[in-house]
């Protein structure tokens, strides 16, 4: 038996494993690194986040990723080279961070590398129903493994698609393993570039869990800020959006998007909710935004007395869009629970994570839309809201290494929802 196979087998037999979870999301802000000590597997999993850091991409690298991100036409040579470079960069950042934390590579059982999503294309987006769901992440796992000298599990989403899923969101696996409760219903929402929800009824089996994307989280906000508030890359603490007022016509048009009427589960991405989509929508309403030459920007046929808005008003509207689409998803889950229990009000614990929790305008709007419920962050559960996604991928790697077939008893066995107990391709450093 090859040494790396022996080491992998030994890791799978341990009572606890040290796993580094990596996440780089659609916000393109950098790499999240979570050093996790994980005990057990399946519903007996326990995780301790020993260290966590988020490392920003350098401006040059971020711009290179943006050129290929969510674009239908790209320079294929640039995309191919970036696949290798992102993998090597992520491995280098892990190696440097482990050294700073005083951890030897030999102490780490594996890296769980999500990679960098550059395109997500479920059937609901590409509309070619005879063709499969698809998604593409760059940052090759072999290059991660070689750069840091640690066995790397990567490309998790492809196994989910191969089994008939959409490749996203995958949060339900970790959310269920960590936060399923016999006593209460829980709703966990992550606000990254895209917002997603995991709803777990009390005493739930895996098949009872609802997991779905809800719509744009920060992606439209960030894209608008990058274009109209250069050199800013995002609206820190909603300092810009809180100065604005909502644009009723724009908000109504945004909320009328067919995606919001699709039943859960569903997935989406910046490919659909793009800056181009937003600007086309604004032109069709039309909405007048004040510029240095406002007259030149006024659409033909629009009355001169029409209200002129500011760019901050667009940000306010987008913040409300995010909050309303999240609240709508939560209410849909609660409504279903109410019907099942024949109750007017169902008690649900709501926990938020992701970069969006730092946006007070979004969070306050969500709380206003859900006045009967206490909206908290995952900090209440002992998990840093910023670290959650990286931790969840570490849990997926742990299941791949040490999970057992016993998990299948918690997963639906019907032909349309085949169990996906193990995800991730294994890449060795030697």
Image (cartoon, rainbow, N blue to C red):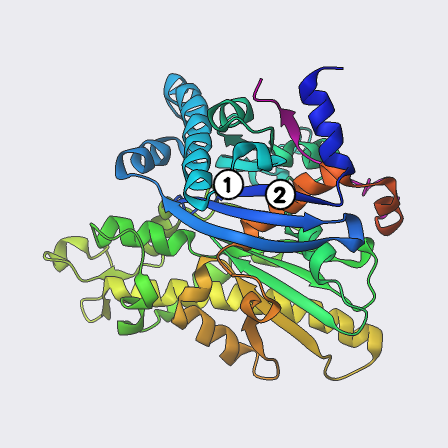
Q: Magenta segment range?
A: 412-430
Mark 1 and mark 2 in contact? Answer it, CB < 8 Å.
yes
- Location of residue 304 with respect to 262 vertically, above or below: below
Q: Which residue is mark 1?
A: 103
Disc sitting over residue 211 in the figure:
none
Name the one closer to the observer, 57 or 218. 57
Q: Residue at x 22, y 55 (%)?
A: 229
**Secondary structure under the numbered disc 2 in the rendered image:** strand
The quadrant in which the C terminus is found is top right
Q: Residue at x 29, y 39 (%)?
A: 58
The quadrant in which the N terminus is found is top right
Name the one closer to the observer, 414 or 102. 102
Q: Which residue is mark 2?
A: 18
- Location of residue 342 with respect to 171 vertically, above or below: below
Q: Is residue 29 visible?
A: no
- Location of residue 420 with respect to 336 vertically, above or below: above
Q: Residue at x 78, y 37 (%)?
A: 13
- Residue at mark 1 to residue at mark 2: CA–CA distance: 10 Å
**Secondary structure under the numbered disc 1 in the rendered image:** loop
Where does residue 223 sit, x and y in percent of width and height? 34, 49
**Extreme residue toward the left, this view:** 292
Q: Earlier in the sequence, mark 1 or mark 2?
A: 2
In which quarter of the view is residue 344 placed? bottom right
């Amino acid at each position: 038996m090859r040494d790396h196979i022996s080491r992998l087998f030994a890791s799978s037999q341990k009572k606890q494993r040290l796993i580094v979870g990596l996440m780089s999301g659609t916000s393109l802000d950098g790499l999240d690194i979570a050093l996790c000590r994980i005990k057990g597997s399946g519903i007996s999993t326990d995780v301790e986040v020993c260290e966590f850091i988020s490392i920003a991409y350098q401006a040059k690298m971020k711009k290179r990723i943006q050129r290929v991100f969510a674009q239908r036409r790209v320079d294929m040579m640039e995309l191919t080279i970036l696949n290798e470079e992102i993998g090597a960069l992520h491995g280098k950042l892990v190696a440097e961070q482990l050294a700073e934390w005083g951890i030897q590579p030999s102490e780490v059982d594996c890296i769980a590398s999500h990679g960098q999503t550059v395109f997500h294309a479920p059937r609901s987006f590409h509309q070619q129903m005879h063709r499969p769901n698809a998604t593409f992440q760059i940052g090759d796992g072999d290059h991660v493994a070689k750069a840091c000298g640690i066995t790397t599990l990567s490309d998790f989403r492809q196994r989910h698609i191969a089994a008939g899923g959409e490749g996203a969101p995958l949060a339900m696996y970790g959310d269920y393993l960590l936060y399923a409760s016999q006593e209460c219903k829980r709703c966990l929402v992550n606000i990254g570039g895209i917002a997603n929800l995991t709803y777990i009824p009390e005493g739930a089996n895996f098949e009872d869990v609802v997991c779905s994307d809800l719509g744009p989280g920060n992606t439209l906000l960030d894209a608008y800020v990058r274009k109209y508030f250069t050199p800013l890359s995002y609206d820190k603490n909603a300092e810009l959006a809180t100065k604005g007022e909502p644009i009723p016509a724009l908000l109504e048009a945004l909320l009328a998007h067919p995606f919001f009427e699709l039943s859960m589960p569903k997935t989406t991405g910046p490919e659909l909710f793009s800056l181009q989509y937003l600007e086309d929508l604004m032109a069709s309403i039309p909405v007048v935004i004040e510029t240095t030459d406002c007259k030149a920007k006024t659409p033909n046929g629009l009355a001169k007395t029409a209200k002129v808005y500011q760019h901050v008003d667009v940000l306010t509207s987008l913040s409300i869009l995010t909050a309303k689409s999240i609240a709508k998803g939560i209410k849909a889950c609660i409504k279903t629970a109410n019907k099942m229990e024949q109750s007017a009000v169902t008690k649900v614990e709501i926990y938020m994570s992701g970069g969006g929790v730092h946006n007070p305008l979004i969070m306050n709007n969500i709380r206003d839309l859900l006045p009967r419920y206490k909206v908290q962050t995952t900090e209440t559960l002992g998990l840093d809201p910023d670290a959650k996604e990286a931790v969840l991928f570490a849990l997926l790697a742990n299941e791949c290494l040490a999970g057992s077939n016993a998990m299948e008893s918690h997963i639906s066995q019907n032909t349309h929802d085949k169990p996906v107990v193990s995800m991730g391709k294994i890449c060795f450093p030697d």
